[in-house]
Image: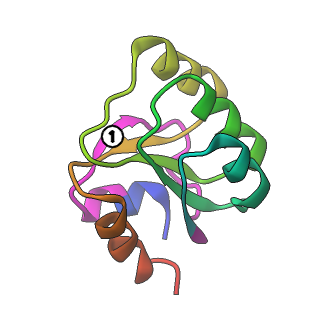
Amino acid sequence: MTVGEFAKQNPLNVLCMPEAEREITGCYIGDLLSWVMGNAREGDAWVTIMSNTNIVAVATLTNVSCIILAENVTLDEQALNTAKENGVNVLSSNLSAFNIALLLKDTVV
């Protein structure tokens, strides 16, 4: 399923979606950026509560399909602009990381 399709079918807010056609092929949940860099896979939907500009850099390095901010986390303007400039999809939700993962489980079977 693409990031765009996933966003339309679930309770998510689109903050930035320059590449709606990116396929979601997995899920990675983590907040320690160095850990995410070493373990997230290309195509994963990365679920986190981190919201600074560094998450965009990590998303670019790992080539995840999108960042999903859990638990009503917001993205500051600088991070949002960096995401737009780098073609990184960013979504947000009031759901917990666990509940977002449950939504993703049927997407990436």
Query: Residue 79 in magenta?
Result: no
What percent of the width, then of the height, locates residue 33? 65, 41
Magenta residues (range): 7-26
Left-right relation of 93 to 27? left
Picture residue at 34% right of the left edge, 76% below the top: 102
Relative height, residue 104 to residue 109 (above, below):
above
Circle 1: residue type = Val
Residue indicated by mark 1: 14
Give the image quarter of residue 96: bottom left
Instruction: Please name whichever residue, 108 or 47, is drawn nearer the observer in this view of the structure.
Output: 47
What percent of the width, then of the height, locates residue 54? 62, 27
Residue lying furthest top: 78
Picture residue at 26% right of the left edge, 65% below the top: 9
Q: Is residue 17 visible?
A: yes
At numbered mark 1, what does the secondary structure look like: helix, strand or loop? Answer: strand
Give the image quarter of residue 58: top right
Left-right relation of 13 to 39? left
What percent of the width, then of the height, locates residue 44? 61, 62
Left-right relation of 91 to 52? left
Q: Is residue 63 visible?
A: no
Magenta stretch: helix, strand or loop mostly: loop
All told, the count of numbered labels is 1
Give the image quarter of residue 77: top left
Picture residue at 47% right of the left edge, 37% below the top: 50
